Amino acid sequence: MLDSLKQQPADALLALIKLYDADSRTDKIDLGVGVFRTETGATPVFAAIKEAEKRLVQSQDSKAYLGPEGDMGFVRALIPHIFGADHPWGDRIDGMQAPGGTGALRLAFGLAMRAGLRRMIVGSPTWPNHTQMFGEMVIESVTFNHAGPDGAADMDALRAAVAGAETGDAILLHGCCHNPTGIDYTPAQWDEIARLLADKGLLPIIDLAYQGLGQGMDEDAYGLRAVLAAVPEALVCYSCDKNFGLYRDRVGAVYVLGKDAESTGRILTNGHNLARTNWSQPPDHGAAAARIVLEDADLTKMWLDELAAMRGRMRLMREMMAAADNRVGGMDLAPLATQNGLFSILSLDKDQILKLREDHGVYMAGSGRINVAGLTKGNIENFVSALAAVVG
Ligand code: LMR
Protein backbone atom coordinates (compact mmCIF):
# COMPACT_ATOMS: atom_id res chain seq x y z
CA MET A 1 0.00 0.00 0.00
CA LEU A 2 2.60 2.53 1.07
CA ASP A 3 4.78 1.71 -1.91
CA SER A 4 2.13 3.27 -4.15
CA LEU A 5 3.11 6.75 -2.88
CA LYS A 6 4.86 8.87 -5.47
CA GLN A 7 8.21 10.55 -4.91
CA GLN A 8 7.69 14.19 -3.83
CA PRO A 9 10.04 17.09 -4.42
CA ALA A 10 11.56 18.65 -1.30
CA ASP A 11 9.98 21.93 -0.15
CA ALA A 12 11.70 24.42 -2.44
CA LEU A 13 12.53 26.97 0.31
CA LEU A 14 13.77 24.46 2.85
CA ALA A 15 15.80 22.64 0.17
CA LEU A 16 17.80 25.84 -0.36
CA ILE A 17 19.26 25.46 3.16
CA LYS A 18 20.89 22.15 2.20
CA LEU A 19 22.02 23.38 -1.21
CA TYR A 20 23.69 26.38 0.40
CA ASP A 21 25.37 24.25 3.08
CA ALA A 22 26.77 21.91 0.43
CA ASP A 23 28.40 24.79 -1.51
CA SER A 24 32.10 25.01 -0.60
CA ARG A 25 32.66 28.54 -1.95
CA THR A 26 33.72 30.83 0.92
CA ASP A 27 32.15 33.92 -0.64
CA LYS A 28 28.69 32.35 -1.11
CA ILE A 29 25.70 34.48 -0.09
CA ASP A 30 22.55 33.05 1.48
CA LEU A 31 19.46 35.12 0.65
CA GLY A 32 17.16 32.10 0.81
CA VAL A 33 15.10 30.96 3.77
CA GLY A 34 13.71 33.67 6.04
CA VAL A 35 15.92 33.79 9.10
CA PHE A 36 17.46 36.94 10.49
CA ARG A 37 21.25 37.23 10.21
CA THR A 38 23.71 39.55 11.88
CA GLU A 39 26.47 41.46 10.13
CA THR A 40 28.63 38.31 10.48
CA GLY A 41 25.96 36.06 8.99
CA ALA A 42 24.96 34.44 12.32
CA THR A 43 21.44 33.75 13.59
CA PRO A 44 22.10 33.94 17.34
CA VAL A 45 19.74 33.15 20.19
CA PHE A 46 18.38 36.44 21.59
CA ALA A 47 20.22 37.44 24.81
CA ALA A 48 16.81 37.94 26.47
CA ILE A 49 15.82 34.37 25.53
CA LYS A 50 19.16 32.95 26.74
CA GLU A 51 18.59 34.57 30.12
CA ALA A 52 14.98 33.37 30.22
CA GLU A 53 16.10 29.83 29.37
CA LYS A 54 18.55 29.88 32.30
CA ARG A 55 15.74 30.92 34.62
CA LEU A 56 13.46 28.29 33.11
CA VAL A 57 15.96 25.48 33.70
CA GLN A 58 16.40 26.59 37.30
CA SER A 59 12.73 27.06 38.12
CA GLN A 60 10.88 24.42 36.10
CA ASP A 61 9.96 21.53 38.37
CA SER A 62 7.78 19.49 36.02
CA LYS A 63 7.26 18.77 32.38
CA ALA A 64 3.83 17.24 32.91
CA TYR A 65 1.17 18.05 30.28
CA LEU A 66 -0.40 21.51 30.15
CA GLY A 67 -3.32 20.80 27.83
CA PRO A 68 -4.11 21.42 24.15
CA GLU A 69 -4.09 25.20 24.67
CA GLY A 70 -0.43 25.17 25.76
CA ASP A 71 1.03 27.84 28.03
CA MET A 72 -1.77 30.35 28.51
CA GLY A 73 0.59 32.64 30.45
CA PHE A 74 2.58 32.98 27.24
CA VAL A 75 -0.54 33.41 25.08
CA ARG A 76 -1.95 36.17 27.29
CA ALA A 77 1.36 37.94 27.91
CA LEU A 78 1.60 38.59 24.16
CA ILE A 79 -1.86 40.18 23.95
CA PRO A 80 -0.84 43.76 24.87
CA HIS A 81 2.02 43.63 22.36
CA ILE A 82 -0.18 42.40 19.52
CA PHE A 83 -3.48 44.15 20.18
CA GLY A 84 -2.24 47.17 22.16
CA ALA A 85 -1.74 47.83 25.86
CA ASP A 86 -5.21 49.36 26.20
CA HIS A 87 -6.95 47.40 23.48
CA PRO A 88 -10.71 47.86 23.37
CA TRP A 89 -11.79 44.24 22.89
CA GLY A 90 -11.50 43.01 26.48
CA ASP A 91 -12.34 39.32 26.83
CA ARG A 92 -13.65 39.14 23.27
CA ILE A 93 -10.01 38.29 22.48
CA ASP A 94 -8.36 35.14 23.68
CA GLY A 95 -6.08 32.55 22.17
CA MET A 96 -4.17 29.33 22.39
CA GLN A 97 -0.62 28.27 21.70
CA ALA A 98 0.26 26.56 18.43
CA PRO A 99 3.41 24.94 17.02
CA GLY A 100 4.85 27.96 15.20
CA GLY A 101 3.16 30.13 12.63
CA THR A 102 2.45 27.12 10.44
CA GLY A 103 0.64 25.36 13.29
CA ALA A 104 -1.29 28.57 13.98
CA LEU A 105 -2.37 28.81 10.33
CA ARG A 106 -3.34 25.17 10.20
CA LEU A 107 -5.45 25.65 13.32
CA ALA A 108 -7.08 28.85 12.05
CA PHE A 109 -7.89 27.26 8.69
CA GLY A 110 -9.29 24.24 10.52
CA LEU A 111 -11.52 26.50 12.64
CA ALA A 112 -12.77 28.32 9.56
CA MET A 113 -13.48 24.99 7.86
CA ARG A 114 -15.45 23.75 10.86
CA ALA A 115 -17.47 26.95 10.65
CA GLY A 116 -18.30 26.29 6.99
CA LEU A 117 -15.50 28.07 5.13
CA ARG A 118 -16.34 28.25 1.45
CA ARG A 119 -13.25 29.80 -0.16
CA MET A 120 -10.06 31.52 0.90
CA ILE A 121 -9.27 34.80 -0.81
CA VAL A 122 -5.57 35.60 -0.85
CA GLY A 123 -3.21 38.02 -2.59
CA SER A 124 -0.69 36.54 -4.98
CA PRO A 125 2.17 35.98 -4.62
CA THR A 126 1.94 34.71 -1.07
CA TRP A 127 4.09 32.53 1.18
CA PRO A 128 4.27 29.23 -0.77
CA ASN A 129 3.33 27.26 2.35
CA HIS A 130 -0.05 29.05 2.44
CA THR A 131 -0.81 27.59 -0.94
CA GLN A 132 0.58 24.17 0.02
CA MET A 133 -1.69 24.12 3.07
CA PHE A 134 -4.75 24.99 0.96
CA GLY A 135 -3.90 22.00 -1.23
CA GLU A 136 -3.34 19.64 1.69
CA MET A 137 -6.52 20.74 3.48
CA VAL A 138 -8.57 20.88 0.27
CA ILE A 139 -9.43 24.56 0.63
CA GLU A 140 -10.54 26.31 -2.53
CA SER A 141 -8.61 29.56 -2.96
CA VAL A 142 -9.24 32.65 -5.04
CA THR A 143 -6.26 34.89 -5.72
CA PHE A 144 -5.89 38.56 -6.51
CA ASN A 145 -2.81 40.50 -7.50
CA HIS A 146 -0.98 41.74 -4.40
CA ALA A 147 1.47 44.14 -6.02
CA GLY A 148 1.03 46.62 -8.82
CA PRO A 149 3.71 47.52 -11.39
CA ASP A 150 4.65 50.61 -9.35
CA GLY A 151 5.86 48.40 -6.48
CA ALA A 152 2.93 49.34 -4.21
CA ALA A 153 -0.04 47.23 -3.14
CA ASP A 154 -2.59 46.75 -5.92
CA MET A 155 -5.67 48.13 -4.16
CA ASP A 156 -7.86 47.86 -7.23
CA ALA A 157 -7.25 44.11 -7.33
CA LEU A 158 -8.05 43.79 -3.63
CA ARG A 159 -11.24 45.86 -4.00
CA ALA A 160 -12.39 43.67 -6.89
CA ALA A 161 -11.62 40.47 -4.96
CA VAL A 162 -13.58 41.65 -1.93
CA ALA A 163 -16.45 42.78 -4.15
CA GLY A 164 -16.56 39.31 -5.72
CA ALA A 165 -16.57 37.51 -2.36
CA GLU A 166 -19.59 35.57 -1.17
CA THR A 167 -20.99 34.44 2.16
CA GLY A 168 -18.68 31.92 3.77
CA ASP A 169 -15.49 33.30 2.23
CA ALA A 170 -12.48 34.32 4.30
CA ILE A 171 -9.57 36.55 3.35
CA LEU A 172 -6.01 35.77 4.36
CA LEU A 173 -3.94 38.93 4.88
CA HIS A 174 -0.28 39.40 5.85
CA GLY A 175 -0.31 41.71 8.89
CA CYS A 176 3.12 43.15 8.09
CA CYS A 177 6.39 42.42 6.25
CA HIS A 178 4.59 40.77 3.36
CA ASN A 179 6.19 37.48 2.41
CA PRO A 180 7.51 37.38 -0.35
CA THR A 181 7.23 40.97 -1.63
CA GLY A 182 7.91 43.19 1.41
CA ILE A 183 5.04 45.37 0.13
CA ASP A 184 2.76 46.28 3.04
CA TYR A 185 -0.47 48.24 3.04
CA THR A 186 -0.21 51.83 4.28
CA PRO A 187 -2.31 52.82 7.31
CA ALA A 188 -4.79 54.56 4.98
CA GLN A 189 -5.06 51.41 2.87
CA TRP A 190 -5.61 49.29 5.99
CA ASP A 191 -8.39 51.65 7.06
CA GLU A 192 -10.07 51.12 3.70
CA ILE A 193 -9.54 47.35 3.84
CA ALA A 194 -11.14 47.27 7.29
CA ARG A 195 -14.23 49.08 5.94
CA LEU A 196 -14.42 46.83 2.88
CA LEU A 197 -14.24 43.64 4.95
CA ALA A 198 -16.82 44.89 7.43
CA ASP A 199 -19.24 45.93 4.67
CA LYS A 200 -18.87 42.57 2.94
CA GLY A 201 -18.98 40.44 6.09
CA LEU A 202 -15.77 38.61 5.14
CA LEU A 203 -13.90 36.68 7.83
CA PRO A 204 -10.37 38.11 8.14
CA ILE A 205 -7.54 35.69 8.91
CA ILE A 206 -4.42 37.73 9.62
CA ASP A 207 -1.00 36.13 9.45
CA LEU A 208 1.35 38.10 11.71
CA ALA A 209 4.69 36.33 11.50
CA TYR A 210 7.10 39.27 11.57
CA GLN A 211 5.82 41.77 14.14
CA GLY A 212 8.60 44.21 15.02
CA LEU A 213 10.72 43.50 11.95
CA GLY A 214 9.06 46.11 9.75
CA GLN A 215 8.50 49.56 11.22
CA GLY A 216 8.02 48.79 14.93
CA MET A 217 5.86 46.64 17.21
CA ASP A 218 2.84 48.98 17.21
CA GLU A 219 3.31 50.13 13.62
CA ASP A 220 3.42 46.52 12.39
CA ALA A 221 0.14 45.78 14.17
CA TYR A 222 -1.67 48.82 12.75
CA GLY A 223 -3.51 46.88 10.07
CA LEU A 224 -4.57 44.08 12.36
CA ARG A 225 -5.92 46.53 14.92
CA ALA A 226 -7.74 48.56 12.23
CA VAL A 227 -9.39 45.42 10.83
CA LEU A 228 -10.37 44.09 14.26
CA ALA A 229 -11.92 47.45 15.15
CA ALA A 230 -14.25 47.14 12.16
CA VAL A 231 -15.35 43.50 12.10
CA PRO A 232 -17.30 41.27 14.52
CA GLU A 233 -15.05 38.22 14.18
CA ALA A 234 -11.45 37.54 13.13
CA LEU A 235 -8.61 35.08 13.52
CA VAL A 236 -4.97 36.07 14.04
CA CYS A 237 -2.12 33.64 13.44
CA TYR A 238 1.04 34.63 15.28
CA SER A 239 4.61 33.41 14.98
CA CYS A 240 7.52 33.97 17.38
CA ASP A 241 10.00 32.40 14.94
CA LYS A 242 11.55 35.65 13.85
CA ASN A 243 10.77 38.27 16.49
CA PHE A 244 11.96 36.04 19.34
CA GLY A 245 14.41 34.07 17.16
CA LEU A 246 12.76 30.83 18.29
CA TYR A 247 12.53 29.27 14.83
CA ARG A 248 13.12 25.58 15.57
CA ASP A 249 11.38 25.68 18.95
CA ARG A 250 8.08 26.18 17.08
CA VAL A 251 6.36 28.91 19.06
CA GLY A 252 3.17 30.48 17.80
CA ALA A 253 -0.40 31.23 18.79
CA VAL A 254 -3.88 31.64 17.36
CA TYR A 255 -6.07 34.46 18.63
CA VAL A 256 -9.80 34.65 18.19
CA LEU A 257 -11.88 37.83 18.17
CA GLY A 258 -15.43 36.62 18.84
CA LYS A 259 -18.72 38.46 19.02
CA ASP A 260 -18.55 38.24 22.82
CA ALA A 261 -16.53 36.44 25.46
CA GLU A 262 -18.82 33.40 25.40
CA SER A 263 -18.47 33.07 21.64
CA THR A 264 -14.67 33.44 21.78
CA GLY A 265 -14.44 30.74 24.46
CA ARG A 266 -16.71 28.43 22.48
CA ILE A 267 -14.73 28.93 19.26
CA LEU A 268 -11.53 28.12 21.15
CA THR A 269 -12.93 24.81 22.42
CA ASN A 270 -12.99 23.84 18.74
CA GLY A 271 -9.36 24.87 18.51
CA HIS A 272 -8.60 22.62 21.48
CA ASN A 273 -10.26 19.68 19.66
CA LEU A 274 -8.23 20.37 16.54
CA ALA A 275 -4.99 20.61 18.50
CA ARG A 276 -5.76 17.37 20.33
CA THR A 277 -6.20 15.42 17.12
CA ASN A 278 -3.22 17.01 15.36
CA TRP A 279 -0.41 17.41 17.91
CA SER A 280 -2.28 16.99 21.20
CA GLN A 281 -0.28 19.79 22.86
CA PRO A 282 2.22 22.28 21.52
CA PRO A 283 5.93 22.10 22.43
CA ASP A 284 6.52 23.97 25.66
CA HIS A 285 10.11 25.13 25.95
CA GLY A 286 10.26 28.12 23.59
CA ALA A 287 6.88 29.49 24.65
CA ALA A 288 7.86 29.20 28.32
CA ALA A 289 11.07 31.14 27.60
CA ALA A 290 9.11 33.83 25.71
CA ARG A 291 6.66 34.04 28.64
CA ILE A 292 9.52 34.61 31.09
CA VAL A 293 10.76 37.45 28.84
CA LEU A 294 7.30 38.99 28.64
CA GLU A 295 6.65 38.74 32.39
CA ASP A 296 9.86 40.58 33.31
CA ALA A 297 10.13 44.29 32.48
CA ASP A 298 13.94 44.22 32.14
CA LEU A 299 13.93 41.18 29.87
CA THR A 300 11.09 42.67 27.82
CA LYS A 301 13.14 45.81 27.29
CA MET A 302 16.19 43.72 26.36
CA TRP A 303 14.09 41.79 23.83
CA LEU A 304 12.55 44.93 22.30
CA ASP A 305 16.01 46.54 22.04
CA GLU A 306 17.38 43.48 20.26
CA LEU A 307 14.42 43.56 17.90
CA ALA A 308 14.99 47.27 17.20
CA ALA A 309 18.63 46.56 16.35
CA MET A 310 17.58 43.82 13.91
CA ARG A 311 15.11 46.18 12.29
CA GLY A 312 17.77 48.86 11.99
CA ARG A 313 20.23 46.49 10.32
CA MET A 314 17.67 45.36 7.76
CA ARG A 315 16.70 48.97 7.07
CA LEU A 316 20.36 49.82 6.41
CA MET A 317 20.72 46.89 3.97
CA ARG A 318 17.56 48.02 2.19
CA GLU A 319 18.92 51.56 1.86
CA MET A 320 22.26 50.30 0.56
CA MET A 321 20.47 48.18 -2.06
CA ALA A 322 18.32 51.13 -3.13
CA ALA A 323 21.45 53.27 -3.44
CA ALA A 324 22.90 50.70 -5.89
CA ASP A 325 19.90 51.21 -8.17
CA ASN A 326 21.72 52.79 -11.12
CA ARG A 327 24.40 50.08 -11.14
CA VAL A 328 22.12 47.18 -11.97
CA GLY A 329 20.98 47.90 -15.51
CA GLY A 330 17.24 48.30 -15.82
CA MET A 331 16.38 46.80 -12.44
CA ASP A 332 14.43 49.05 -10.09
CA LEU A 333 15.95 48.65 -6.64
CA ALA A 334 14.62 51.92 -5.17
CA PRO A 335 11.41 50.33 -3.76
CA LEU A 336 13.52 48.09 -1.50
CA ALA A 337 14.06 51.09 0.76
CA THR A 338 10.35 51.50 1.43
CA GLN A 339 9.44 47.82 1.65
CA ASN A 340 9.40 46.05 5.01
CA GLY A 341 10.80 43.03 6.75
CA LEU A 342 13.06 40.27 5.58
CA PHE A 343 11.88 39.97 2.01
CA SER A 344 11.71 41.73 -1.33
CA ILE A 345 11.24 40.38 -4.82
CA LEU A 346 13.76 41.12 -7.55
CA SER A 347 12.55 40.95 -11.08
CA LEU A 348 14.74 38.07 -12.27
CA ASP A 349 13.89 35.12 -14.49
CA LYS A 350 14.66 31.47 -13.73
CA ASP A 351 17.88 31.46 -15.78
CA GLN A 352 19.18 34.54 -14.02
CA ILE A 353 18.38 33.04 -10.60
CA LEU A 354 20.18 29.82 -11.58
CA LYS A 355 23.16 31.78 -12.90
CA LEU A 356 23.38 33.75 -9.67
CA ARG A 357 23.56 30.45 -7.81
CA GLU A 358 25.89 28.54 -10.09
CA ASP A 359 28.24 31.29 -11.22
CA HIS A 360 28.19 33.59 -8.19
CA GLY A 361 27.19 31.46 -5.18
CA VAL A 362 24.10 33.62 -4.49
CA TYR A 363 21.14 31.62 -3.14
CA MET A 364 17.58 32.98 -3.35
CA ALA A 365 14.08 31.59 -3.72
CA GLY A 366 12.91 30.61 -7.20
CA SER A 367 10.44 33.51 -7.17
CA GLY A 368 13.31 36.03 -7.10
CA ARG A 369 12.68 36.65 -3.42
CA ILE A 370 15.71 37.76 -1.45
CA ASN A 371 16.13 37.78 2.32
CA VAL A 372 17.71 41.19 2.90
CA ALA A 373 19.00 40.01 6.29
CA GLY A 374 21.41 37.75 4.37
CA LEU A 375 23.15 40.88 3.09
CA THR A 376 25.99 42.46 5.05
CA LYS A 377 28.27 45.46 4.56
CA GLY A 378 30.87 42.85 3.61
CA ASN A 379 28.91 41.00 0.90
CA ILE A 380 26.51 43.57 -0.53
CA GLU A 381 29.08 44.83 -3.02
CA ASN A 382 29.60 41.29 -4.37
CA PHE A 383 25.85 40.76 -4.57
CA VAL A 384 25.30 43.98 -6.54
CA SER A 385 28.13 43.05 -8.94
CA ALA A 386 26.69 39.54 -9.39
CA LEU A 387 23.25 41.03 -10.10
CA ALA A 388 24.73 43.47 -12.63
CA ALA A 389 26.54 40.56 -14.32
CA VAL A 390 23.44 38.40 -14.75
CA VAL A 391 21.08 41.24 -15.63
CA GLY A 392 23.60 42.28 -18.28
C1 LMR B 1 10.35 31.81 4.79
O1 LMR B 1 9.39 32.15 4.09
O2 LMR B 1 11.49 31.71 4.35
C2 LMR B 1 10.13 31.54 6.24
O3 LMR B 1 8.83 31.85 6.61
C3 LMR B 1 10.54 30.19 6.63
C4 LMR B 1 9.60 29.13 6.16
O4 LMR B 1 9.19 28.34 6.99
O5 LMR B 1 9.29 29.08 4.96
Image (cartoon, rainbow, N blue to C red):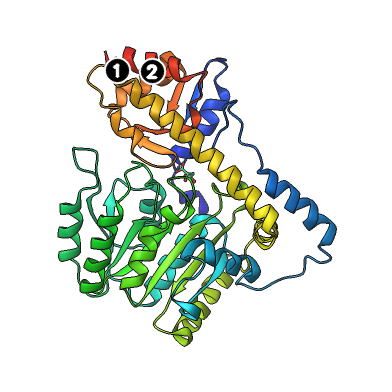
Residue 192 place in picture, x, y as percent: 23, 62
Residue contact at pointers 1 and 2, CB within 8 angstroms: yes
Residue farthest bottom in this picture? 262
Which residue shows up at 44% across the image and 29% down it? 317
Locate residue 204 relative to residue 107 in the image: left or right. left
Between 209 and 229, the one lying in front of the other is: 229
Q: Find residue 16 and name its label.
A: none
Classify mark 2: helix, strand or loop: helix
The answer to whether 210 appears left or right of 231 in the picture is right
Q: Can residue 32 be seen?
A: no
Q: Assess disc 1: are there few (<14), some (14-19) or many (≥20) residues with their C-alpha within 10 Å of its C-alpha.
A: some
Toward which corner of the image does residue 173 lie, by quadrant? bottom left
Mark toward the start of the polypeptide (1 vs 2): 1
Q: Is residue 88 visible?
A: yes
Q: Residue at coordinates 20% horizontally, 48% vertically from top-left? A: 154
Helix, strand or loop at mark 1: loop
Which amino acid, by three-letter code, is at mark 2? Val
Residue 150 lies, with reference to residue 331, above or below; the image says: below
The residue under the point 35% across, 62% down is 138
Residue closer to the observer: 171 or 358: 171
Q: Position of residue 66 (x, y in %)?
A: 69, 72
Residue 239 is situated, as x and y percent measured from the top left of the image, at 52, 55
The residue under label 1 is 328
- Image quadrant holding the C terminus, namely top left
The amino acid sitting under disc 1 is Val
Residue 222 lies, with reference to residue 352, above or below; the image says below
Q: Position of residue 29 (x, y in %)?
A: 49, 22
Quarter of the image where one finds residue 387? top left
Q: Which residue is mark 2?
A: 384
Q: Which residue is found at the position 69% from the left and 43% from the top? A: 47
Q: Quadrant of residue 115?
A: bottom left
Residue neighbourhood size for the residue with mark 2, other residues' Cα within 10 Å, grouped as few (<14), some (14–19), many (≥20): some
